[in-house]
Image: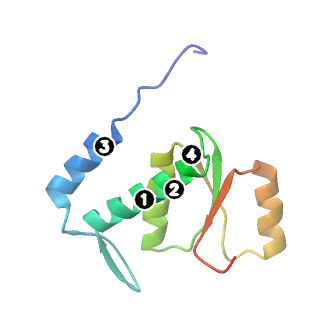
């Protein structure tokens, strides 16, 4: 088992297929509105590129502090596209708890949807 290597996904092909089939349709709705598949994928790809440009390498831990929302969907996909490994933290926790949890995983990046 130690020599096993999982097959890789061709995300460009997969996402092009999703866009071709569902692009203008609504992908996610939350209390603030909706986002189409086109917009969700575009935002995820932009975040993935930004994370890679900032030094995220495959398998690196990226902490997220994102509320349950449509943003959480494209943030998760963006981290996946960057090659990073998402570590979700509860944005409702106190700042001390968040910092302690983040210190346990030693993330290379943190993505949040609230004040820094």
Nearest to the observer: residue 53 or residue 9: 53
Specify the farthest residue to the bottom: 32
Say if mark 1 contacts mark 3, CB within 8 Å.
no
Q: Label 4 crowding class (10 Å Cα cut-off): few <14, some 14-19, many 20+?
A: many
Q: CA distance from mark 4 to mark 3?
A: 16 Å
Q: For the N terminus, which image quadrant?
A: top right
Q: For the C terminus, which image quadrant?
A: bottom right
Q: Label 3 crowding class (10 Å Cα cut-off): few <14, some 14-19, many 20+?
A: few
In the image, what residue occupies the spot 66% across and 55% down? 109
Numbered tag placed on residue 46 in the rendering? 1
Q: Label 2 crowding class (10 Å Cα cut-off): few <14, some 14-19, many 20+?
A: some
Q: CA distance from mark 2 to mark 1?
A: 6 Å
Say if mark 2 contacts mark 1, CB within 8 Å.
yes
Secondary structure of the residue carrying tag 2 is helix
Image vertical order of residue 36 relative to residue 78, above or below: below
Q: Mark 4 or mark 1, which has the lower sequence index?
A: 1
In the rendering, at what x and y percent does residue 61 appear?
65, 47
Residue designated by label 3: 12
In the rendering, at what x and y percent does residue 98 appear?
77, 67
Q: Which mark lies nearer to you, 1 or 3?
A: 1
Numbered tag placed on residue 50 in the rendering? 2
Q: Label 1 crowding class (10 Å Cα cut-off): few <14, some 14-19, many 20+?
A: some
Q: Which mark lies nearer to you, 2 or 4?
A: 2
């Amino acid at each position: 088992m130690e020599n096993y290597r999982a097959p890789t996904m061709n995300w460009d092909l997969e996402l092009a297929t999703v866009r071709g089939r569902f692009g203008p349709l609504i992908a996610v709705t939350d209390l603030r509105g909706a986002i189409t598949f086109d917009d969700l994928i575009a935002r995820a790809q932009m975040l993935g590129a930004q994370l890679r440009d900032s030094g995220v390498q495959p398998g690196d831990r990226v902490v997220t502090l994102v509320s349950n929302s449509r943003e959480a969907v494209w943030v998760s996909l963006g981290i996946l596209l960057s090659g990073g490994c998402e570590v979700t933290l509860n944005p409702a926790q106190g700042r001390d708890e968040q910092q302690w949890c983040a210190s346990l995983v030693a993330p290379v990046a943190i993505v949040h949807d609230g004040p820094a």
